[in-house]
Image (spheres, grey):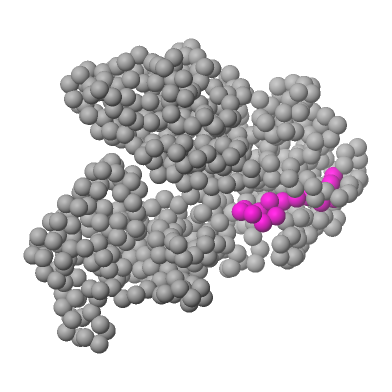
Amino acid sequence: MEQGNDILRVWREDPDRGLRLLIDAYAGPVWKIVRHKLAGAACEADMEETVNDIFLEIAEKAERVDEAKGALTAFVLTLARRRAVDAYRRIAHRQEFPAEEPRPDEPAPDNPEALVLQKEERRRMLSLLMTLGEPETTILFRRYYYGESYAEIGKIVHLSENAVNKRCLKALQTLREQMKGDIFQ
Amino acid sequence: MTDNTFESLFESLDETELQTLVNAGVNADAPATRSEKKRLYHLTKKNTESVRRLPKGRAGKTVLLAAALLTAFVLVAGAVAHFILPATIPEHIEGFTLQAVDPVVIEQDGIFVPVTATSDNCRITLEAIVKGDVLNRNLFTGEEVKNEKTYAVVTIKPDDAALYEEWQTGKKGEPVSIWMVEGYAPLCMSGYGCNWFIDGVVYHLADVTDAALFADRELYLAVSVNTPDWSVLRMDEQGKFYYLDRTVGMRAILPLPLDTNKADRAKADRYASEHSFITEPDYSWYDEQNALDDTFIASGVDLTPYIGDNEWRGSSPLQFGVVEHAREWFALSEARPADGVIPASFLYDYAFATNEAPAQSELPKDAESHAFENGDKWYYVGSDSFLLYPADGTAARLVVVKPGGIVIDVEADFNALVNRLYRENAGHAPAGYAAELYLLGGYAYNRYNWYTEEMYDSDVRFYRDAGDARHAIIAEYWSCNGTVQVIL
């Protein structure tokens, strides 16, 4: 996927062709994120509208994205997730069902000490995550960022559903041990 | 560490963290379907451009449906007064918006001498080039845009009335056309065409408005049944176009003399760039596929027992009566490939259609499936996998399942069949691999591809013995008494 530099370069020279490349590279991930976030809350038309809005915004802002490696992908995924969350909240409000509830492990916003601790733990966990190597890192990413099933992930990493399941559990176990079971139960 | 913890972490990843993950090699790729990408592209463009160009033509079922919009006929003046041109030319825009095009003025574009070719007992004539200001009216939004259009009018008269009827019903496709510019590989250009069936003659209208930009160069119109691809339609090193001998069905390459006053070199160059026109096409993949087809056909393997009908039969091979179609056993452990690699798992995709949604229990097991309804059919698309444990004595029994449905889905890119997957993963078929399976796989893949392409009027691969063959490929895995059975 990471041909962001090429896409940005083409975009600047030829926006139409750049748009095609952008969609070719990122339509799938954006759809993944939107479906994961809005499944059960929105109909397909609402999801499609959200995806369209995301790409419109990407099209508006793509020029300003850094050409550093990985930057475009990170920008697209982050934007997609934010807009998907926004869409979810709009729909939740419209349909009068509960908006997202804070997770039990999330510190209260007015607890700065907890926030700092959480930030440090995030940094450690991400650092450990990348030491797992592949395909474990991809498995975990796709499981929790895209919400993919083990079977779907298996198609990407060329493993059976069972194998993905096992590797995922093993990876979590490894991370837990390495974090020495701190606040993560 | 709980799932919630992890989910929380990933949900709150910022750009920098994501960038770090991506750069570390995390695979974040995800395919989108072709229709998703196309719709997205056009909707995004629509918000930035006021005028959209028409998509690649689909001279198929949508046109037949749109024929209901025809309200009147007008006579075309000039040398071709003997044929009629519908007043309302339906056009199908990508996705689901239908526009009705009312010509304000249609007249012959310059002096033109009809050009005729004969092929497959059909008489194909480029009758006229017509032009006009046409009013596009979106039936849903009422928005109106006036465009100047240029059309090539082609008549196709088959000697065989049965062929005319088959085209009329769309069972074996119908005439389509592609405009071509000398020096650019065919099929880089888009175009739109539609057909009217009147008294044994097919009147084919090809939108060549974009071609007019190139009117100062040699232009051609390739007419055939179903849209060809590079396995049959090519350009030689001198920039000339030709069909390969293997092409089946009516086809012709006619000169397309458009008004040179419409040529615009700068716009044409930009058009060529935007649409990625190719001057040096690479036909190697198509040559490989053609060679595979030829080898299979020469092998004489008879697949007619495996040709089924449209009736849904469920997923169990036993229901298909598979036993009588069993192939010979071969032992994977004895037929190791030169590099010693034996695939540990196979992933495959399947798709089938049925007239009514089967019960959940009838769907292939251990598979994720996505069902969608389109018109009066239900389509199932899914994937499954199976494992092979190449222990000593492991054998695989290859059994061709009698087809239980029609494989239809052209919007997803399928990597169907064991053989092709293996070829892609390992780079070659293993030594001693059952040649029949290899050929069967290739043939079945191609035939499957052909059938779906017939339905969706995209690229089609022609076969010498092309017939009405259709089959579905459903594979299932189970283990029995220590051996693994691969049912293909």
Left or right: where B128 falls relative to B484: right
Residue shown at 68% from the left, 37% from the top: B176
> In the shown orientation, is residue A8 left or right of residue B467?
left
Question: Whole-percent x and y of residue A106?
Answer: 24, 76
Up/down of A142 relative to B152, above or below = below
Q: Quadrant of residue B421?
A: top left
Give B172 or B238, whichever is nearer the viewer: B172
Q: In the image, what residue occupies the spot 88% across and 49% down?
A: B72
Q: Could you tell me residue B98's position as x and y percent?
A: 70, 55
- Please give the name of the residue rendered at 29% of the width and 16% of the height, measured from the top-left corner: B330
| Coordinates of residue A169 in the picture (x, y in percent) | 20, 52
Q: Quadrant of the N terminus of chain B?
A: bottom left
Query: Residue B94 lies in magenta, yes or no?
Result: yes
What segment carries the magenta color?
B85-98
Residue located at (28% from left, 58% from top)? A141
Near-viewer residue (B216 or B78): B78
Q: Give the image quarter of residue B450.
A: top right
Nearer to us in this view, B244 or B441 = B441
Residue farthest to the bottom? A110
Instruction: Check the image and report above or below for B220 versus B287.
Output: below
